[in-house]
Amino acid sequence: MDSQSNQKDETASGAPYHVGIIMDGNGRWAQRRGLPRLAGHQAGVDNIRRILESSVEHGIKVLTLYAFSTENWGRPPEEVRGLMRLLGLTIRRQLNELDRNGVQIRHSGRLAGINPELQDQIRHALEVTQHNDRIILNVAFNYGGRAEILDAVRHIIADGINPDDLTEDLFSRYLYTCDLPDPDLIIRTGGEWRLSNFLIWQAAYAEYYTTPTFWPDFDEAELHKALVEYAARERRFGRVLQS
Ligand code: IPE
Ligand code: IPE
Ligand code: MG
């Protein structure tokens, strides 16, 4: 069915194929320790490695991490600058190891608006790792679900697509996530129960899981807990399941 064409079956192990994580709570994690917010963001970046490794062990094939939203530009300039610097530093420090470990890096979001030097670094990371296939690490940076939909509409109009030919499947192919299957599970750390503009089209039928644990404290055991809960969910996609 058209609306389910981007829905892929689970992995053989029953783990979700595509997991999206809204990595929230870095600021509060730092505040609790009397540290500046940026120390929380650094701790958040440090946490990515263990969750990425643990995801591979669980058989997850695509991990999308929400790192910077289009709304996050509204934060104090010093924090925005710090977050930009952190992405650049992380690419510089981690790219070789990620590549060696078979991680394919993708970017979802607008490159426009990001400083040109950082844009180059992002493009470089994508290019270097494009043939890796152990896991896809899709970084949602300068990402907004509404901006993504508008960008898709702009491209569809520019391509002269006939309105009668526009299907959900075709539309999905104009999104930043074009060839990735829809997320099966969205995890939000930091306790909020909202999507904050994350994958709003793609998450139409994703399972949602939230935990009060701040992102820097979200460890392997926490991921395991989320996956156990996911495995117990019954995904119906609007249908009635035959028993
Ligand atoms: C999430 O942590 C990281 C980004 C949005 C970049 P926050 O910075 O939102 O942390 P809290 O929600 O203020 O604790
Ligand atoms: C969502 O967290 C964005 C990222 C994790 C990158 P926010 O902290 O920006 O979301 P709100 O403000 O609580 O909705
Ligand atoms: Mg937050």
Image (cartoon, rainbow, N blue to C red):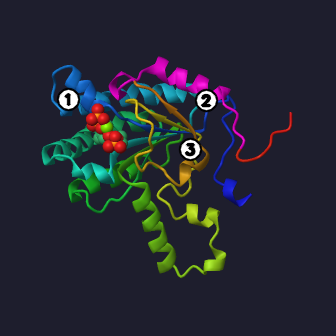
Neighbour tally class for label 2: few under 14, some 14-19, many 20 plus, Cα within 10 Å: many
First to last magenta residue range: 213-236
Inter-mark Cα distance, 2 to 3: 12 Å
Name the amino acid type tagged 1. Answer: Ala
Circles 2, 1 touching at the beta carbon (< 8 Å)? no
Neighbour tally class for label 1: few under 14, some 14-19, many 20 plus, Cα within 10 Å: some
Name which of mark 3 and mark 1 comes first in the sequence. Answer: 1
Name the amino acid type tagged 2. Answer: Tyr
Q: Where is the C terminus found, in terms of image quarters?
A: top right
Q: Which residue is mark 1?
A: 39
Q: Which residue is mark 2?
A: 230
Dot 2 lies on which element? Answer: helix
* For residue 116, side relative to residue 98 (left or right): left
Residue mark closest to the camera, 2 vs 3: 2
Inter-mark Cα distance, 3 to 1: 30 Å
Name which of mark 2 and mark 3 comes first in the sequence. Answer: 3
Q: Which residue is mark 3?
A: 183
If the picture is divided into quarters, which one holds ligand 3?
top left
Q: Where is the N terminus found, in terms of image quarters?
A: bottom right
As drawn, the label of residue 78 is: none
* For residue 29, side relative to residue 212 (left or right): left
